Amino acid sequence: MKISTGAEFYDNDEAFLAYTKRRQQKENANDTIEKPAILQLLGDVTDANVLDLGCGNAGFGAELLEQGCFSYTGVDGSINMINAAQQQLSNYPNARVLHESMEHYTPPRTEYDLVTARLSLHYMEDLASIFTKVNQALKPEGRFIFSVEHPVITSTLQPSALRTNWTVDNYFSMGFRQQHWMGGYVQKYHRTLEEYFSLMQQSGFTVTNLKEACPQQEHFDNVETYERRMRIPLFLLMSGVKNRKSKEIET
């Protein structure tokens, strides 16, 4: 049984097609729950230089550019995602995408006003070094906004399916997990909410907001879907500002 990293998983053409079809479903959780919460944290991006880690197909990048950001750089380890992102951004001269894994990518220092990472960091084993590199990449008082699968989800990672109950177990045992998802097995890393908060502080950020993406009924046409989504948190989001003294932190 092969257990893929996040990038490897999306470079499996069957898994990539299944993922794309799921994202196109009208009431998928990303668009009905995670995206509205991200937009609440995002605020004004006018003239911002943006770095997007785990950019996927860069649909988010196109939206940021339409909102007036000055430049957009997307980074992703999956060549399937990079190819989709290049098509998505083909009409934006101030956008680029880089085919690199987050673990090995080192962004230029003090280059960006905003760094985002949407639903990509739970694939990363060494999150502390990534957070430190994000901090170094930001200008003074630059912002970092990310979303991950909620810790009550990653604590067990049951097979993806419609269900009426959830099992939360081994919550405080952090580390590697595997999940059977869309016909394959993918590796993820479980962390507690406290751990995400602590890593932000230790990496030189002041945490400014934390959200568990409570579903909002106006984003759902189907009442039953909304009521089911109200039962358990799927996503954790956090935003932070680079501390003035964080320039002293080194990798």
Image (cartoon, grey):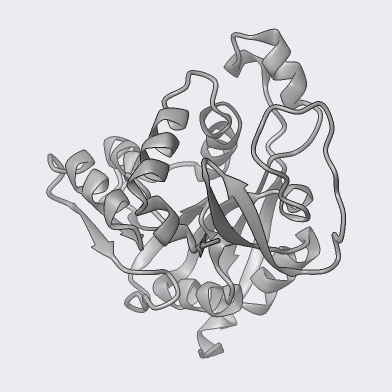
**Which quadrant of the view contains residue 110?**
bottom left
Q: Does residue 115 appear in the picture of this structure?
A: no
Residue 109: percent from the left, percent from the top? 36, 79
Asked if residue 107 is positioned above or below residue 23 in the image, the reply reads below
Position of 194 with respect to 235 (left or right) is right
The structure residue drawn at horizontal position 54% and vertical position 34%, both measured from the top left corner, is: 30
Q: Residue at x 59, y 73 (%)?
A: 125
Give how far across and how far down residue 16 sits, in percent. 38, 43
At a point 55% along the width and 72% down the height, the residue shown is 131
| Tally of marks | 0
**Residue, x 12% and y 49% (percent of image)?**
93
Closest to the observer: 180 or 215?
A: 180
In the rendered view, tell whether residue 205 sits above or below residue 7: below
Quadrant, the N terminus: bottom right
| Horizontal side of residue 17 vs 161, given as left or right | left
Give left or right: position of 106 versus 202. left
Depth order, front residue of 13/61: 13
> Is residue 184 shown above or below 194?
above
Between 154 and 146, which is closer to the camera in this rendering? 154
Residue 238 visible (yes or no): yes
Q: Quadrant of residue 8?
A: bottom left
Q: Position of residue 27 (x, y in %)?
A: 54, 20
